[in-house]
Image (cartoon, coloured by chain):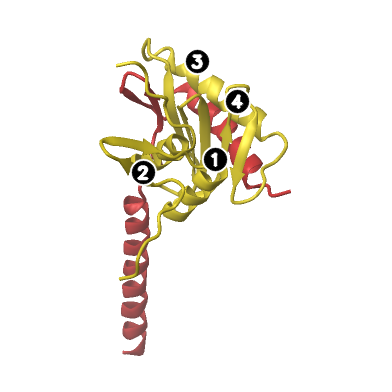
Chain colours: A yellow, B red
Amino acid sequence: MGERTPSSGDTVRAGQDVKEIPLTIDDAIRDLLDVSTDIQSVAVLDDADTVVAAGPGPVAADAAGAVTLLWDAAARRAATCGDAPLDHAIVPGESGSVAIVAAHGHRIVAVTGLQPAVGLLLFDLRTCLGDAYPVEDGPR
Amino acid sequence: MRSRYVAAAALAAGAVAGLVLWRRRGGASPRPAVQLGLSDGSVHALDAADPDVATLERLADAVRRALLETG
């Protein structure tokens, strides 16, 4: 077995303190595409509905608008299901699924192949955002 | 005698073809439902007959095209 060198996203231990060094969103997307075989393309939007990163290649200029339209429609439908805000949406299609997850002040959208492993997909998307935009520790 | 063999072969071929078609129709898995997850942890699967499903599928198609278009 070879030795594994720490990457910039690894946990750094100093005494009892454990700090996560955030990845750049581009690095987090690269890691996501490395681990997920379901995902064909992914984009991350900030709270101003601007695409801040995408992979493995660029996305169309109207991607942000298309994602926002889908999210808003899903949020309207979700409002009839309960009081809590929409956390994620998965829409299967004939050639694959589109999944959107909101977390850490951003939304990440992924295009997948047919019948992805949904639980794993949601976990991977959430992890990608968490790696790049970790939650600040609040007062304890 | 030969015509009986031909008839039996045709009957067997038809039976096999019918079985294949039946298996394909019966074995085809239905498309998964549209799934909406709320921040309270609840997950709601929309019925295929839900009128909002067609809208969400159309908007998702637009997202798919936008993300897979590499310029």
Of the 4 image quadrants, the one containing the C terminus of chain A is: top left
Query: According to the image, label 2 marks what residue?
Result: A12
Find residue A79 and report its image quarter. top left
Q: Secondary structure at mark 3?
A: helix
Q: Position of residue A96 (x, y in %)?
A: 49, 46
Same chain for the residues under marks 4 and 2 in the image: yes
Q: Amino acid at mark 4?
A: Thr
Q: Nearest to the eye among marks 2 and 1: give it.
A: 2
Name of the residue lying farthest toward the front: A15
Q: Secondary structure at mark 1?
A: helix
Of the 4 image quadrants, the one containing the N terminus of chain A is: bottom left
What distance separates the C-alpha of mark 4 from that of mark 2?
36 Å
**Which disc, if any, is residue A76?**
3
Where is A57 relative to B66, above or below? below
A107 vs B33, nearest the viewer:
A107
Chain letter for the residue marked with disc 4 in the picture: A
Nearer-N-terminus badge (4/1): 1
Chain letter for the residue marked with disc 3 in the picture: A
Q: Amino acid at mark 2?
A: Val
Q: Secondary structure at mark 4?
A: helix
**Mark 3 in CB contact with mark 4 (< 8 angstroms):** no
What distance separates the C-alpha of mark 2 from that of mark 1?
19 Å
Name of the residue lying farthest toward the top: A83
Give the residue at x 44% y 52%.
A7
Q: Amino acid at mark 1?
A: Ile
Nearer-N-terminus badge (2/1): 2
Give the residue at x 42% y 27%.
A135
**Which disc, if any, is residue A68?**
4
Q: Nearest to the eye among marks 4 and 2: give it.
A: 2
Query: According to the image, label 1 marks what residue?
Result: A25
Nearer-N-terminus badge (4/2): 2
